[in-house]
Each structure stands twice: as structure tokens, then as C-alpha cells.
Image: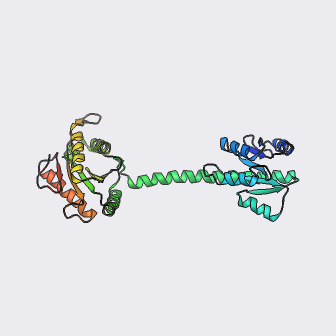
Amino acid sequence: MAAEGSTRILVVDDHPDNVEIIDARLSSRGYEIETANNGQEALDKVYANPPHLILCDVMMPLIDGYEVSRRIKSDDDLPFIPIILVTARDSTQDKVEGLEAGADDYLTKPINFPELEARVRSMLRIKRLQDELDQKNRELEVANKRLRKLSITDGLTELFNHRHVHQLLHEEFERSMRTGEPVAVAMLDLDRFKQVNDTYGHPTGDVILYETARIIRETAREIDMVGRYGGEEFIAILPNTTVEEAAQFAERVRQAVESHEYRDEANLIHMTVSSGVASFPGLDVDSPELLLKRADEALYVAKESGRNQVVRASESTVTA
């Protein structure tokens, strides 16, 4: 049964007569044959356009078949390519050396062509199965990454969700304790959001939440971690940041929200945000839970003192 014309076999041998005979036999069976006269030429062709199978003579000058196999099989950037080594040496030690070099099969000279064709078909079946397995593994890896992202992401805002934010906070707090670098938390809460929801409806509220999340994300640095803490409340974990720097970050967010025009299909809305910030080391904070509590207490003060302002955990008055 003829093979598909797209199945390419690279024949490597420093004796042109051997190459010509194998080429003629396999070409008549429908395979597309490429040839190389030495090991380096074979490697160059493999890297330029990997074949589906390689028939490689063992005894060649400079780079022999064992080394060709070894280099191809050790390169993780190449796909799986079955290699059949061809040699007049048929001792057990020769075969072991070839297999240890990465060859997938061994064929001795003089070549028995029905055996050659059978081994080629067998190796190509293995390659098809391996390629299918590799494809399924790639698809599984993509699916797992998608599931991983879904498991840690808030569906509406595309920020980290509540559970993952807590995990990140614990990790950053431990890192801060280990390195001595500060870590800060900013709690940000949209003012009078319930009133907006009741007046304009939840679809409009969703637009406001999504756009606020975008404002916070764009204000944050690459190393900062931003999450939706719940409802209309957001959190930013700020590595290597003092309480003063955290207050500056929250103030930039406050100004951006205040100046932003939130639009849905029919409405133009202006919003404000209140923030509380805290950092470690500082005050009596000795745990991530207490750091979060201090930021939340500061947020409460911001709300009770008129909203649309930033409060540091160390302060009893607002900073506006």
C-alpha cells in the first residue's frame, strides 16, 4: 500500500549508490525522499525542515549515525522523528550503542527491502501515534491553563478572585518577613454603588465594576496584584511598598475614578471611590489577616468621614 506523498523520509549515507537504491525503492512506494551525504548535512536538513522519518547509515566520517541520532533526540525543540540506523555491523553491542544513542530501530546490511518497508511503515505508525499524543497533550495543557485562569479569576472584572487574593497576600506577607521588604494593601470601595444599582440596574452596575477594575489594573505596576474582594470592593497587594507609597497609589486611583465617565447604552454616570491602606512592617501588624484588617479599618474611616478619600491605617484623620 502506497504512503501519502507528504510523508518525507530523509536517507543519510555517504555512499551515493546506497542512497540511490533506497531512494528508488521507497519512492516507488509513494514516499517523498530527501537525501544527505553526511551527518552534518543531515542535521542541517532536519533543523531546516524536520522529516517524518530518518534512515541513517552508522559508519560515516566526522559525524557518524550514532552522533546524528544523539543530537536529534536530545533536542527538545524538534518533534519526534523515528530514526532507523542502517549498518553492516550487527553485533549486539552495536545495536545497544545505537539504541542508547536514541535510534528507534536497527536495520542490517545487506538490506532486505520487504523488511525495510515493513520497518518504515511500523515507525511511521509510531510517529503518527506520538504526534497525536503530543497534540492531545498540547490541547490538554491549554485547557488546564484556561481552567487555572478561570479558577483564580473573577468572571466579571477579570481580576483575581477573593480566594486567590488571600493566597497571594499570604505569599507576599511571608516574602516580606523573609526579605525585610515592605508590603502594602490598598482596599478600594466604590461609593454609593448600591444606589447606582438600584437606580440604573445591574447591567449598568456591571459596566461600572468592569471599568473600575480596568482603572485599578492600569494604575498598578506589573508586580502589583489586583483583585475583586467582593461586591463593589477591590484590593491591591503592593510588594515593596510603604504605607505612604500605597496612599499615593490609592490617590491616583481615586482621581482616575472621579474623572472617569461611566457609560452604558443610555446613561452617563460619575463615581467616586474610598480607600484604606496599610503596610507591613507597621503598627502592630504581625499577620496577613491583621494587615488586611488594618486596611479595612482605614477604609471604614474613609467611608464614615465623607467618602472619596484615602486613609492610611496609621492615621485617625483623613488625608484626602
Horizontal side of 236 relative to 300 (left or right) equals right
Q: In front here: 204 or 124?
A: 124
Q: In front here: 92 or 38?
A: 38
- Residue 119 in the image: state x and y as whole percent: 79, 54
Q: Is residue 129 visible?
A: no
Is residue 308 positioned above or below 105 on the image?
above
Q: Is residue 21 visible?
A: yes
- Residue 60 in the image: state x and y as whole percent: 79, 50
Q: In front here: 64 or 209?
A: 64
Q: Tell me what residue is drawn at x 84 percent, y 58 percent.
A: 89
Label tally = 0
Q: Which quadrant of the structure image shows residue 100?
A: bottom right
- The coloring applied to the image is rainbow
- Residue 146 in the image: state x and y as whole percent: 46, 51
Q: Tell me what residue is drawn at x 21 percent, y 60 percent.
A: 282
- Residue 3 in the image: state x and y as whole percent: 77, 44
Q: In front here: 61 or 106?
A: 61
Spot the residue most to the front. 62
